[in-house]
């Protein structure tokens, strides 16, 4: 994935034609539905957020939040963690998936922070991507949530929901990120990331999305298709004939 020298910056690979959907109205509804959306990871410092985000790969945020208090009690900053070996970290994070690889990444990233950045978490995409275990999703999460740098981190929820809504049509996270950046104003990037995640967790589930209860169902091409194809319940009658006039309008 491409990186830029300053800030989150635009992703590459979003050049394909975007579906025709009322993006502005969708953003308004997402904002109204999830006005308090924020990261579910608990953190107090940029270093804690970096560590928690690395741990969250293929692991729920709720589980990560049960692991990090003990980890940060033992290793509260990059200098302390840089002195640890992966074997020291493993017992503290072994409830997370892929914990052995994550322990290696955490130890190596902490050492890189100490050697290259004086123990501080850098504030640019390029420098974050240079850390072991950090990809563009993790870098965007840190930049947006720790430093208020606009960015859209594309996890499984964002990827799925953005494609279903027609806000993107990407085959890879990089393509979806670039397309969302093209589609949405920069000031909305960080909030949109959280809103799409919340929508994916609460409504637009991977296997059985609640299209009938979705506030975007009248705008979402995937939702309209699913509702048209949904089988009628046994004994259910067809739609009642509506009277003309305001009372019968959709």
Image (cartoon, helix red, strand yellow):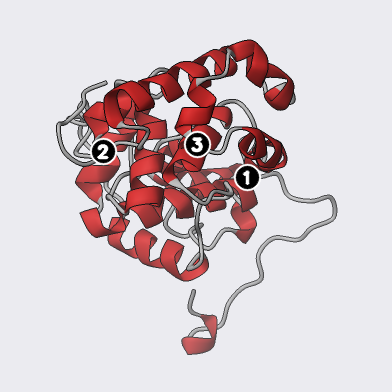
Q: Secondary structure at mark 2?
A: helix
Residue at image position (58%, 17%) is: 103
Disc 1 target residue: 209
Q: Position of residue 77 (x, y in %)?
A: 50, 36
Disc 2 target residue: 179
Residue at image position (42%, 32%) is: 138
Label 2 vs label 1: CA separation? Answer: 23 Å
Q: Earlier in the sequence, mark 2 or mark 3?
A: 3
Residue at image position (53%, 29%) is: 80
Q: Secondary structure at mark 1?
A: loop
Q: Secondary structure at mark 3?
A: loop
Tell me if residue 87 comes above or below residue 22 in the rendering.
Answer: above
The mark closer to the camera, 2 or 3, is: 3
Left or right: residue 230 compared with residue 124: right
Residue at image position (40%, 24%) is: 134
Label 2 vs label 3: CA separation? Answer: 36 Å
The mark closer to the camera, 2 or 1, is: 2
Tell me if residue 240 comes above or below residue 83 in the rendering.
Answer: below
Tell me if residue 16 comes above or below residue 185 in the rendering.
Answer: above
């Amino acid at each position: 994935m491409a990186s830029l020298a300053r800030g989150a910056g635009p992703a590459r690979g979003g050049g394909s034609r975007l579906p025709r959907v009322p993006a502005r109205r969708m953003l308004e509804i997402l904002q109204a539905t999830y006005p308090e959306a924020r990261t579910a990871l608990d953190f107090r410092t940029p270093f804690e957020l970096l560590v928690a985000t690395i741990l969250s790969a293929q692991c729920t945020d709720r589980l990560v939040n049960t692991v990090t208090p003990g980890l940060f009690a033992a290793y509260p900053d990059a200098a302390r963690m840089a002195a640890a070996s992966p074997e020291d970290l493993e017992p503290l994070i072994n409830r997370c998936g892929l914990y052995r690889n994550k322990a290696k990444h955490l130890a190596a990233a902490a050492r890189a922070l100490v050697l290259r950045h004086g123990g501080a978490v850098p504030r640019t995409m390029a420098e974050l991507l240079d850390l072991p275990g950090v990809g563009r999703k993790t870098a965007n999460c840190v930049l947006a949530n720790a430093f208020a740098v606009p960015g859209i981190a594309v996890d499984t929820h964002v990827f799925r929901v953005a494609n279903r809504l027609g806000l993107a049509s990407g085959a890879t996270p990089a393509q979806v990120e670039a397309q969302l950046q093209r589609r949405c104003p920069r000031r909305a990037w960080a909030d949109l990331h959280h809103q799409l995640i919340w929508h994916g967790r609460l409504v637009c589930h991977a296997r059985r999305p609640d299209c009938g209860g979705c506030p975007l169902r009248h705008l979402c091409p995937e939702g309209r298709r699913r509702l048209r194809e949904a089988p009628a319940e046994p004994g259910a009658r067809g739609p009642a004939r509506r009277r003309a006039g305001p009372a019968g309008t959709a």
